[in-house]
Image: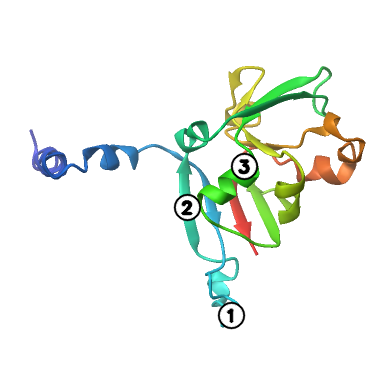
Amino acid sequence: MNFYQRMAWGIFSMLAVWGFLPQALAATEPVVLRIYAPPANSAAAKPPKELANGPLVASLPIDFFKKLPQHSFVTKTPWYKKPVKFTGPLLRDVLAAVKVKGAVIHAVALDDYQATIPFSDAAQFDVILAHTMDGETLTPKNKGPLFVVYPYDSKPELQAVRFYERSIWQLKALRLE
């Protein structure tokens, strides 16, 4: 065993003794979504330019999304010929779980495509952050790991270009204002 392996083993041993091993291992799960939000007292002082969208509030692994209440619906989309079943937590549940609020959500994809979603959409519609589609786990190759999806067939008003444009796939970050 080389020096670095011994050091790593020693650190993990100490964490296990102190009861932190589950948390240490959980930290190694890949992050699929980062959420940025303005500080709670942002009305009092304008944040520095580098924090214009607020500091990092949460770095969430996929297991976080799977532990929240799951919602599914089948809907037609402009991207698939047949109706598709999407499953994931409600966007409003995710935002509530990390205790963030705002007026606007800027969603950012892996390829840096951005969509602006009014915060009110999360309350008004059952928007989900889908992690599965037709029972298959979403990956970057098939619009994952997360896909913002509206229940388009539930209301005629949702069958509009503005809602399709808000349905961002390969979601990597949410920036709230």
Please state, as top left, top right, bottom left or bottom right, where the C terminus lies in the image.
bottom right
Q: Are marks 1 and 3 in contact (CB under 8 Å)?
A: no
Q: Position of residue 95 (x, y in %)?
A: 58, 50
* Foreground: disc 2 or disc 3: 2
In this view, 134 is above or below 44 = above
Q: Which residue is mark 1?
A: 46
Q: Position of residue 157 (x, y in %)?
A: 91, 41
Q: Which residue is mark 3?
A: 171
**Spatial separation of the CA atoms under disc 1 and disc 3:** 27 Å
**Mark 2 secondary-structure assignment:** strand
Q: Which residue is mark 2?
A: 58
Q: Are marks 2 and 3 in contact (CB under 8 Å)?
A: no
The residue type indicated by label 1 comes to: Lys
**Mark 1 secondary-structure assignment:** loop
The residue type indicated by label 2 comes to: Ala
Question: In the image, what residue occupies the spot 88% across and 42% down?
Answer: 161
User: Coloured how?
Assistant: rainbow
**Left or right of 32 in this view: 76:** right
Report whether residue 91 is seen.
yes
Q: Position of residue 87 (x, y in %)?
A: 64, 27
**Spatial separation of the CA atoms under disc 2 and disc 3:** 14 Å
* Dot 1 or dot 3, earlier in sequence: 1
**Left or right of 16 in this view: 44:** right
Q: Are marks 2 and 1 in contact (CB under 8 Å)?
A: no
* Dot 2 or dot 3, earlier in sequence: 2
**Mark 3 secondary-structure assignment:** strand
* Foreground: disc 1 or disc 3: 1
* Dot 2 or dot 1, earlier in sequence: 1
Name the image quarter holding residue 12.
top left
Question: In the image, what residue occupies the spot 42% across and 38% down?
Answer: 30
